[in-house]
Image (tube, helix red, strand yellow):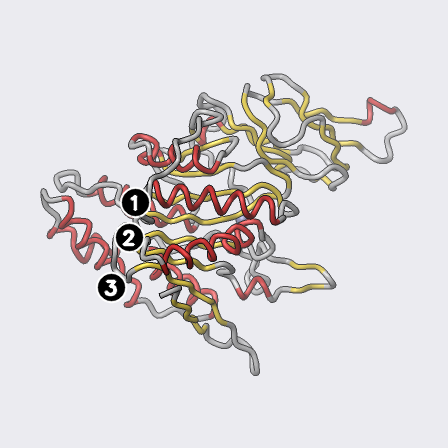
Amino acid sequence: MAFKKSSITLPSMTPGTQRNISVLRFGKAGARPKVYMQAAIHANEMPGTMALHHLMPLLTEANQKGLIQGEIILVPTVNPIGQAQLVGNSHAGRYNLLSYENFNRNWIDLSDAVAARVGNKLGADADTNVRTIRKAAQDSLKALKPLNELGTLRVEVQKLSCDADFVLDLHCDIYAALHLFGAKNDVATGTLTSLAADLGVEATMYNDPYPKALTFSGVNSVLWARLAEQFPQANIPQACMSVTVEMRSQHDVSDALGQSDAQNLYRWLVRQGVVGGKAAPLKKLKTAPAPMSGMDVGYSTCTGFLVFHVKPGAKVKKGQAICDVIDPANPHGAKGRTTFTSQTDGVLFSRRLDGYLSWPGQVMYRICGPQPLPHRIGATGLDD
Ligand SMILES: [Zn+2]
């Protein structure tokens, strides 16, 4: 068989309209490892969709040859609500226009619901615990009664992902180098590092112990970390590696990048035993994984427009000028500029575009630094 395609129908929000999510399945239902990949939850972020466009023919061929050992579920455009938000000839895909919430927040942390269902049944056998927790997670989602379209989207999508061994949420930034966000538990086992090396990322950052914002990748990994913390007497492994992959910039959509990203994902699937075969040797990781608390987030303090001194992927030094905000009505040349400098040595992995307006509190850039920064401990940097 080549693949199975199905569709999730979301409830109608306005008379005469209804939206669907397409789901592609490769391999054997219920087989392990199970991989779930989605793209474009921020609906105007298409590099991940492009990578899946090139990955699907590879998986179709592998499936026809009987090479897929596990189960792979792909959702190339997971957010039809955001896809439809065409406003004044622009595509507004990041925030839900109904509620102004970021589409990658307010996902469902199932840990309390699962704990209430099975906490007292968890014991010393890890495999049994994993099966019990996965079933309870599905049952908890089935018990929810979402009120509207976006609530239904979240529940239905988490039903696809909550029992996966690996979850990849494919995003991009405005202007960025390839980077990813994962969990510290997966750095310790080497699984996050292996994905980072196969993808060739410029920066790898991890939450410790888990993220505050309820991002999609966050809730999928947090389930295990929180249950392990809540039931220390039970043997609860980190049974899902869930990762946000930021696939460069919004405009980084090309066949060349899509093909190489698809090949990198495919090689990683082989390495994890999801697809049969022998994986090519692992590439060397470009930068060591770093804690989220080492991430220097450049916040603007003034109004004006931005001009940058460095591009994404640049290695920077503490004290180095990263960008200026220019006051357009200040006649004194250089004195009309406010310069922002890096607070760490590291890799500048994302920034806004030159010429963007700047406003107080705006995130202008992010830098991955190796050591926790005192002012960043406890902060997320996920400010928008
Ligand atoms: Zn995004």
User: Whole-Å distance between the Cαs marked 3 and 2?
Assistant: 26 Å
Left-right relation of 125 to 140: left
Left-right relation of 256 to 133: right
Q: What residue type is labelled 1?
A: Gly
Left-right relation of 56 to 334: left
Q: Are marks 3 and 2 in contact (CB under 8 Å)?
A: no
Decide: few, some or many residues near mark 2? Use Cα within 10 Å; few <14, some 14-19, many ≥20. many
Q: Which amino acid does label 3 sit on?
A: Asp
User: Whole-Å distance between the Cαs marked 2 and 1?
Assistant: 7 Å
Per the image, the residue denoted by label 3 is 139
| SS class, disc 3 | helix
- Mark 2 or mark 1: whose residue is earlier in sequence: 2
Indicate which disc residue 273 carries. Answer: 1
In this orientation, which residue lies closer to the viewer: 169 or 300?
A: 169
Residue 349 placed where, x, y %?
57, 32
Residue 222 placed where, x, y %?
33, 45
Left-right relation of 35 to 149: left
Decide: few, some or many residues near mark 3? Use Cα within 10 Å; few <14, some 14-19, many ≥20. some
Quadrant of the image containing the N terminus:
bottom left
Q: Quick check: can you spot residue 222? A: no
| SS class, disc 2 | loop
Indicate which disc residue 69 carries. Answer: 2
| SS class, disc 1 | loop
Name the residue rendered at 47%, 57% in the picture: 57
Q: What residue type is labelled 2?
A: Gln
Instruction: In the displayed orientation, state which residue is furthest to the front.
Output: 65
Q: Do the residues labelled 2 and 1 touch (CB within 8 Å)?
A: yes
